[in-house]
Amino acid sequence: MTCKTAVVAVLQLQDAYQPGLQALRAVDRNRIQCSNTRRLTGSVDLDTTLATAHPNASRWDYGIGQVSGSEEEAIWVEVHPANSNHVTEVIRKAKWLKGWLRTNAPGLFVMTRKANGYVWLATGSVSLQQGSRQARQLAMAGVAFPQPRLRLS
């Protein structure tokens, strides 16, 4: 299954799939580096697309499809300030996203990258310490430690 097929299969996302990183806002797209952009298959702006259907939800920002070996995988990216005041909010967003994927987009849930499939992309500097209580909370929630740039191969 491809990310595009999995996205189009979700009624709420049918018109949201864009090639490459086109679904991302330009400022967010510039935070992502990819050594081989041909491996990026597509993207979805979840936050905007699901705003009407889930106006009060803690929505995650983006989904990105990437070829890994012979298969495609999904990577979920939340762009957010990275300090201790926002850890609880990002964890809440990750829990919402995982529940939404399981219920509404099981194909995408299965395609989610096993390691670091849920990425916190910092809007500025990262004001958290590796090994801190907040870092452990993020790890327990399955969210990668925040980073100022996402480097994809």
Image: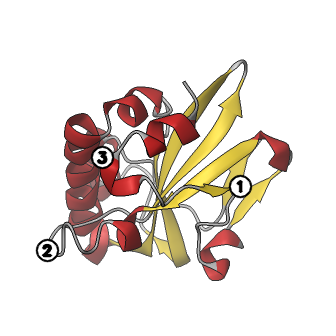
Relative to residue 149, is residue 52 drawn left or right?
left
Q: Which residue is mark 3?
A: 136
Position in image of residue 65 (x %, y %)? 60, 43
Q: Which residue is mark 2?
A: 56
**From where the camera sits, is residue 146 visible?**
no
N-terminal of the two: label 2 or label 3? Answer: 2
- Asked if 85 appears above or below 39 in the picture, the reply is below
Residue type at mark 1?
Gly
N-terminal of the two: label 2 or label 1? Answer: 1
Position in image of residue 74 (x %, y %)? 52, 39
- Sort mark 3 into few (<14), some (14-19) or many (20+) by Cα contacts within 10 Å: some
Q: Looking at the rendered structure, which numbered label has been put on residue 132?
A: none
- Asked if 25 appears above or below 139 in the picture, the reply is below
* Residue at the spot 67% in from the left edge and 66% down from the top edge: 22
**From where the camera sits, is residue 120 visible?**
yes
* Residue at the spot 49% in from the left edge and 31% down from the top edge: 115
Q: Which residue is mark 1?
A: 20
Q: Quadrant of residue 107?
A: top left
* Residue at the spot 67% in from the left edge and 61% down from the top edge: 21
N-terminal of the two: label 3 or label 1? Answer: 1
Residue type at mark 3?
Arg
Q: CA distance from mark 3 to mark 1?
A: 32 Å
Relative to residue 148, is residue 108 drawn left or right?
left
Q: CA distance from mark 2 to mark 3?
A: 27 Å
